[in-house]
Image (spheres, rainbow, N blue to C red):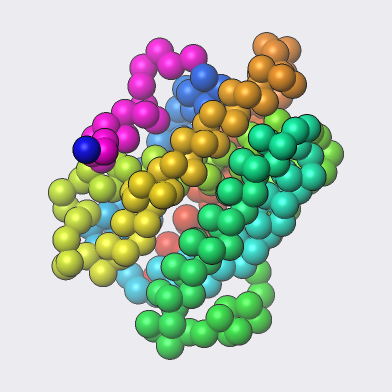
Amino acid sequence: MGEGPAARTGVYESPGAKGLFARLRSAIREEWERYIGHPFVRALAAGTLPEAAFRRYLGQDYLFLKQFARAWALAVYKADDLDEMRAATTALTAVLDVEMGLHVRFCAGWGLGEAEMAARPEASATIAYTRYVLEKGLAGDALDLHVALAPCIVGYGEIGARLAAAPAATGEANRYQAWIDMYAGAEYQQVAAAEIAALDRLFAARGGEARLVALTSTFRQATRLEIDFWQMGLDAA
C-alpha cells in the first residue's frame, strides 16, 4: 500500500529535516504559511471559493504555466549532466501534459476554450512571478533557478497533500475536487519529491553554506509572489 495523505504531508513538515527545501521552508515559515494556508486555498478546501475567483485563477494559471514550461526548458539547458536534464524534462512534461490539460478541461466545462485563454492578457501578478523565475535562471545557475521554481512545484505538492488530509476537502460535493485530486495524487507527489531531491543534489554540487543567504532571499521572494498570485484570483470574486 502507498502512503496516505497524512504521511505525505509529513514529508514536507518533518521537524529537524536537513535538506535544502526544509531549511528554506523553515527560514521563511511566516511567508510559507501565508502561502499554503492562503484564504484562496482554504476556500478551495471547503468548496466555497466563488466561481469567479477560480475562473480568474485558471485563466491566469494557463498563462503562468506556459512561462513555467519555458523555465523548465531553461533548467534543461542549465543542467550539468544527463540526470539533471532528465529530471527537468520530467517536470516540463508534467506542466505541459498534466497541469495544462487539467486547466483546459476545467475551463472547457465552463465554456472557456484554450484559444480564448491563450489570447487573454497576463495579469500583473502572473508577469511578476514568471519573469522573476526566468530572470533568476538566466542570471544565475541551475540552483538559482530551481530555488525560484520550488515554491510552485513543491508548494503545490504540499498544498495538495494538506487538502487531501482535510475531511472537508474531499467528496463529490466539492466542485474543486478534481483540482485537489491532481495535486494530492501520486503522480504529482512524485514530481514534488523529485524536486526536493534535485535541490539537495544541486546544493551539494553548486552550493555550500556561503550561498544559503542568497538562496533564502530568492525562495522568500518567489513565495511572496505565489501569495500575490492567489490574491489575484481571490480579488476577482
Residue 122, image x, y percentages: 65, 69
Q: Nearer the viewer, residue 166 or 72?
A: 72
Q: Is residue 7 left or right of residue 26?
A: left
Q: Is residue 117 left or right of residue 5?
A: right
Q: Nearer the viewer, residue 156 or 120?
A: 156
Residue 211, image x, y percentages: 72, 18
Image quarter of the N terminus: top left
Q: Residue at x 53, y 55 (%)?
A: 94
Q: Residue at x 75, y 37 (%)?
A: 79
Residue 15 highlighted magenta (yes or no): yes
Residue 71 in the image: above or below residue 141: below
Q: Residue at x 66, y 75 (%)?
A: 121
Residue 28, image x, y percentages: 51, 27
Locate residue 60: give its quadrant. bottom right
The range drawn in magenta is 2-18
Image quarter of the C terminus: bottom left
Locate residue 123: give its quadrant. bottom right
Q: Is residue 37 left or right of residue 57?
A: left
